[in-house]
Image (tube, rainbow, N blue to C red):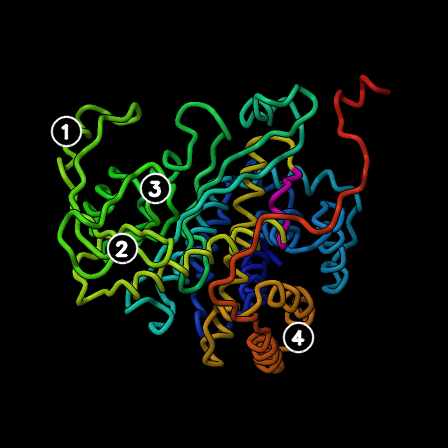
Amino acid sequence: MNDYARKSNLIKSMREQYCQSEGLPFSDILNKEELQEAFNYSPENSRDRIFTPAITLAAFIQQTMNPDQSCRQALANIIADRAAKGLTEISSNTGPYCKARIRLREEMIKKLAMTVGEKLDRSSNHSWTWRGRHVKLADGTTVSGPDTDENQAEYPQPDSQEQGLGFPIARCVAVISLAVGSVLGIAIGPYHGKETGEHALLREILDCYSAGNIFLGDRYYCSYFLIAMLKEKNVDAVFQIHSAREYDFRRGTSLGQMDHLVTWEKPAKPKWMSKETYAEMPDTLQVRETKTYDLVMVSTFLDANEVSKSDLNHLYKSRWTVEIDLLYIKEIMGMGILRCKTPEMMRKEIYTHILSYNLIRTVIAQAADIHDKNPQEISFKGAMQLINSFRPTIIYAKRKNLKRILETMLRVIANQGIADRPDRIEPRVVKRRPKAYPRMTQPRRKSA
């Protein structure tokens, strides 16, 4: 079998294991042409015919979905796959696989991950949107990596920790679809330093928003300049009011009880903004402030007849889903603590986690679409467990049985419901106590 045929078979296998089979919804999310373009690589990297980019990326994806997440487990899957296909046995040494991961282009993984997320959001069922409009949430989080000199140089640990007692920390800001939960954009930077905050990272991926979209964010994102940039793109926004901003419902134009229009004046130029950009910013902004119980919100929906205060309150309650989605990626998929020992590989690991997450979200959307459910009603963890369990069966199934197997998996996934807990608020406390070991106060090499 020549290299092209091998690559085509691997692409077909990757598409089938994530239910991208003909006759099923969203069958073009993992587009053949896009995969083929992503897997194109230069001749100097093609000497290893075993760990081609397609095989390596497929193994990397499975690695992020497996609770073990070790390179040894990923290689074991490749060995088992080759044995099932009657191919030559390969060494159990993980070195060649690890080198093959290094050869994968960072931008290729990122582009593929974002393409899957964006296409899923665009093709989502109209009934999953908010009044026919795509709501996109934004939030930040952090991940840590191995304590190596390279990682510390690019993603240094907090200054409050002594060297040798902490871990490199990277800050991530993600834009996530409310309709289907897919990640549409992600920016990565150091945890601290100049232009490393969430607003700075968000500006790198603001192109994820297009005319007609709705930005939904917490109070941290409620800023004059962000609202101005979103209005320039014809994007509406809903936030909780920033804690530093005062409000007074006795002023402005009243739209009802605890509901009014107010005019904000342009604040002083921030350090990150150029004089030219600042001059182009509007001198004033008209926004709407509403209050329900203790929650004060700011939005660009100025017509109370079109969008009521109750509508805004209900929409803002959906913001919590971004916290849950990030929890799925960090805790259930294990991205919170990365394994790779260089900054570039840390980023590749993050992008591969996002690609895996978006592929799982694709399967959840398929199950929801077929069985008349909302994707947010289906358990992400349950879906991931089922995909992992069905994967070998799907890959090695006879063609005539494949559709029935996929339909069975999607039906079971659709039945993996999660509880509806409206208005639930949980205190940020931990019930299970940690073991009573003393905290490390000096590196192990000094205490040995």
Tell which residue pokes out farthest to the front in this image: 250
Q: CA distance from mark 2 to mark 3?
A: 13 Å
- Is disc 4 placed on a helix, strand or loop? loop
Q: Are marks 4 and 1 in contact (CB under 8 Å)?
A: no
> Tag 4: Cα neighbours inside 10 Å, few (<14), some, or many (≥20)?
few
Tell which residue pokes out farthest to the right in this image: 448
Task: Find disc 2 in the rendering and name its residue.
Answer: 290
- First-in-chain label (2 vs 1): 1
Answer with left or right where residue 228 lies relative to residue 98.
left
Q: Magenta segment range?
A: 332-339
* Residue in front for this viewpoint, 156 or 158: 158
Task: Find disc 3 in the rendering and name its residue.
Answer: 242
- First-in-chain label (3 vs 1): 3
- First-in-chain label (4 vs 3): 3
Task: Find disc 1 in the rendering and name its residue.
Answer: 279
- First-in-chain label (2 vs 3): 3
The disc labelled 1 sits on which kind of residue? Ala
The disc labelled 3 sits on which kind of residue? His
Task: Find disc 4 in the rendering and name its residue.
Answer: 397
On the rendered image, what quadrant is the C terminus found in? top right
In magenta stretch: residue 316: no
The disc labelled 4 sits on which kind of residue? Ala
Answer with left or right where residue 354 lies relative to residue 150.
left
Q: Residue at x 44, y 74 (%)?
A: 25
Where in the figure is residue 54, as x and y percent of width and height?
Answer: 57, 52
Q: Are marks 2 and 3 in contact (CB under 8 Å)?
A: no
Front: mark 2 or 1? 2
Tell which residue pokes out farthest to the top in this image: 446
Q: CA distance from mark 2 to mark 1?
A: 30 Å
